[in-house]
Amino acid sequence: MKESHVPQQNISTYANNKKAIYATDENGKYHLVASTGWEVEEAVTQQALKELERLTDNARRRVLAGEVSPLYFHMYDRRMDLQVLSEATGMSKWRLKRHFKPLIFKRMSHKIRKRYADALGISLDDLGRLPGSGIALDTTKERRE
Amino acid sequence: MNNRTKPFEHGHFAHCESGVMALMMRHYGLPLSEAMAFGLSGALMFAYLPFVKLGGMPVIAYRALPKAIIKGLRKNLGLKMKMQTFSRPQQGTTALNRLLARGEIVGAQTSVFWLPYFPPEMRFHFNAHNLIIYGRENDEYLISDPVFERPVRCAVSALQKARFVKGVMAPRGLLYYPLKVPETIDYARIIPRIIRKTARKMLKTPVPIAGIRGILALSRKIGKLAGEDRRYAKLFLGHIVRMQEEIGTGGAGFRFIYASFLQEAGLLLNNKTLQETSRMMTAVGDQWREFASLSVRAIRLKKERPLDFTALQKKLADVAHAEAAVYKKLLTLKA
């Protein structure tokens, strides 16, 4: 790619950062060029971000409908999936899925809650609720086993 | 090894791991461009692993495994590197602080998601990011992250979290720094050997999912996307392009940086074949970028319009064959 062809499209997904691209000058010599982004890259990053958003919105709806526990929402909200959260907590996928059940989530021990909160990087209080919903879905969070 | 007389200098590069190694070598008196660091490590690669899924998508890599650049350079340049992992986060932080107090600059592997200085648009769960920590001021580390234009800062606790995230390619707090850097390198001896090895690896892999065969396998997979769910098919195409461009490859999935390396090597050794293959590789990189453009055009097609997977499959197969020609030419180099 020629230096003059390096896209400088100020893409949103760079958030005002620049990435270094290798390109050739008029003599064919390679240089590093700081690029404000290529719309092709922006399109695929946005596609990935939108997919994460779709999963998070879907999770929020399901929590509000009482189908799943807030943990399910927080997993997607932190851009994780079953595999990533399972590895981050060291708990099996099967166990995670069990904790997605609202009743079982409510009975979860303090120790397990702490493991989730740490892996997700949120507080114990936040683990039990949806942000911005004003609804405390988890009234038993003070209970210790 | 340390170099107190010389303040550390940050540099903005295409890729994290090659950038870190270039900066580190430069700091210790061995001038090495990022392109040379990348090329000399022999880490150029292609792999399509349909059975290893990350975030629901198969692994598609344009370079060898994480740490391959560090280890490749260690071997090919004869560096002595200290590489250390830790079982407890607190130990890892203590060790880092001790090294910094001694005046070392220290390479570290981290997660991307947990680094607060990354903008939200770039924060994904990828655990094999690399950066240099070159100092500490109170509760903050001074960090040279080569994919950022300027040095950044990061809270001590945040870096600890990013270094000790668990999961695929978990960094386990990896720290690395050179113990001994050679003063001169016999480039005429090592360059042809390293390049031939890379070319052989790309052309003659025993497995059908690596090297040129890997690119062709991915191309065939694209042809089969016609039978898949439309949303998945589009995400799959987007995933390829992200691995090629988004993760910091210098453009075209490291093909431009490799072309730059071939050019620099060609000048150094005054070798016409290297110069010519550099131009060929640049053309291959341009084709990879065209493939990315076509993929995004397909992703953007509205609901009813059919996606032409056959055209994409063919385009990628063409790229594979053009790239194979570069490696065949490189194999004619005399070692």
Image (cartoon, rainbow, N blue to C red):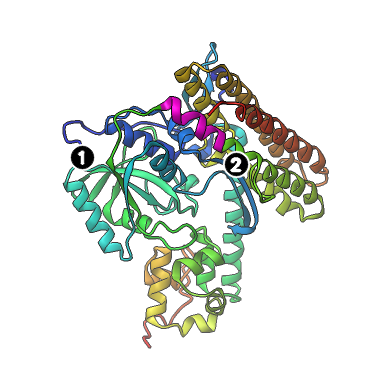
Q: Residue at x 48, y 52 (%)?
A: B126
Magenta segment includes B194:
yes
Residue A43 visible in this rendered orientation of the protein: no
Which of the 4 quarters of the picture holds residue B292?
Answer: top right
Magenta segment, which residues?
B187-197
Percent x, y of residue A143:
38, 85
Q: On the rendered structure, is A61 left or right of B66? A: right
Percent x, y of residue B70:
41, 43
Q: Residue at x 40, y 80 (%)?
A: A141
Say which of B270 and B32 sits in front. Answer: B270
Say which of A49 and B24 sits in front. Answer: B24
Residue type at numbered disc 1: Asn
Q: Residue at x 82, y 41 (%)?
A: B310
Say which of B143 and B177 sits in front. Answer: B177
Is residue B210 placed above or below B37 in the rendered structure?
below
Q: Residue at x 46, y 85 (%)?
A: A107
Tell me the SS state at disc 1. loop
- Chain containing the residue with disc 2: B
Marks 2 and 1 in Cβ contact (< 8 Å): no
Magenta segment includes A49:
no
Q: Residues within 10 Å of mark 2 (few under 14, many from 20)?
A: some
Say which of A83 and A65 sits in front. Answer: A83
Is residue B326 placed above or below B1 in the rendered structure?
above
Q: Which residue is mark 1?
A: B2
Q: Furthest-top residue in view?
A: A27
Q: On the rendered structure, is A108 left or right of B98? A: right
Q: Which residue is mark 2?
A: B201
Residue type at numbered disc 2: Lys
